[in-house]
Amino acid sequence: RQVKLIWQAGFETKNQWLALSDKDRYSEYQPYIEPSLSYREGAWSISLNGRLSGLMRQYQKKNSQNFLAEPRLFIRYSLTSKLDISGSYSYRWTASDITSITCQPYYTDYISCQQGSGQFENTTGQMASLGLGYRNVMTGMFCRLTSGYSNLRDAVIYESQLVNNVYIR
């Protein structure tokens, strides 16, 4: 039986602004810890890790604070010495940057459009997979069959509405 606990701590920051206006400035500060717990016994191997963080964002005079938990899980079971089955799951929360947040006018084909909503936005994603693997070191034959699922939410590709002859996102 083997149990391993590892953790890592850090800090990320992002500052963005548009050259057109000093008011359009976006700042992001994110202290985090990343714990990792691994367990192995016999044919089982399990790993649970992820990131716990506090995200502080500022755009113009608006502020936002979020606590984020982004887990990842990996499980492997060896059916025989050459055949194993594995599965994984992960969740991701991604903050939008200044290009999708800023409320900035631009002009195309004589139509006045507005980019961004001026609000804090984010996307979330989930991924899961299941795999079956074969490995024979003596003959050099390796094979893995994997099936996966991916789900991305709140990712706006394009959205607008016409208000007083102006398209607003």
Image: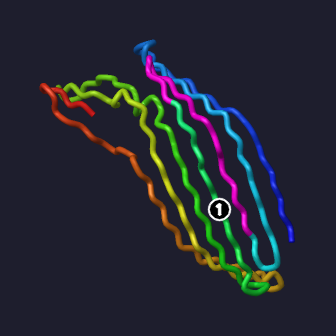
Q: Nearer the viewer, residue 29 or 162?
A: 29
Report which residue position mark 1 lands on. Answer: 73
User: Could you say which quadrant of the image residue 114 lies in?
Assistant: top left
| Dominant SS type (magenta) | strand
Q: Nearer the viewer, residue 72 or 15?
A: 72
Q: For residue 75: magenta?
A: no
Q: Looking at the image, is 80 positioned above or below residue 26?
A: below
Which quarter of the figure is the C terminus placed in? Answer: top left
Where residue 55 sits, quadrant-wise, is top right
> Which region is colored magenta?
46-64
Q: Quadrant of the N terminus?
A: bottom right
Magenta highlight on residue 53: yes
The x, y position of residue 140, in whole percent, is 78, 81
Percent position (x, y) of residue 84?
Answer: 70, 80
At horizontal 41% and vertical 51% (from top left) the residue drawn is 153
Coordinates of residue 151 in the picture (x, y in percent):
45, 58
Q: Is residue 119 above or below residue 151?
A: above
Q: Amino acid at mark 1?
A: Leu
Residue 104, position in %: x, y?
Answer: 33, 23
The residue tagged with tag 1: helix, strand or loop?
A: strand
Which residue: 82% across, 78% down?
Answer: 42
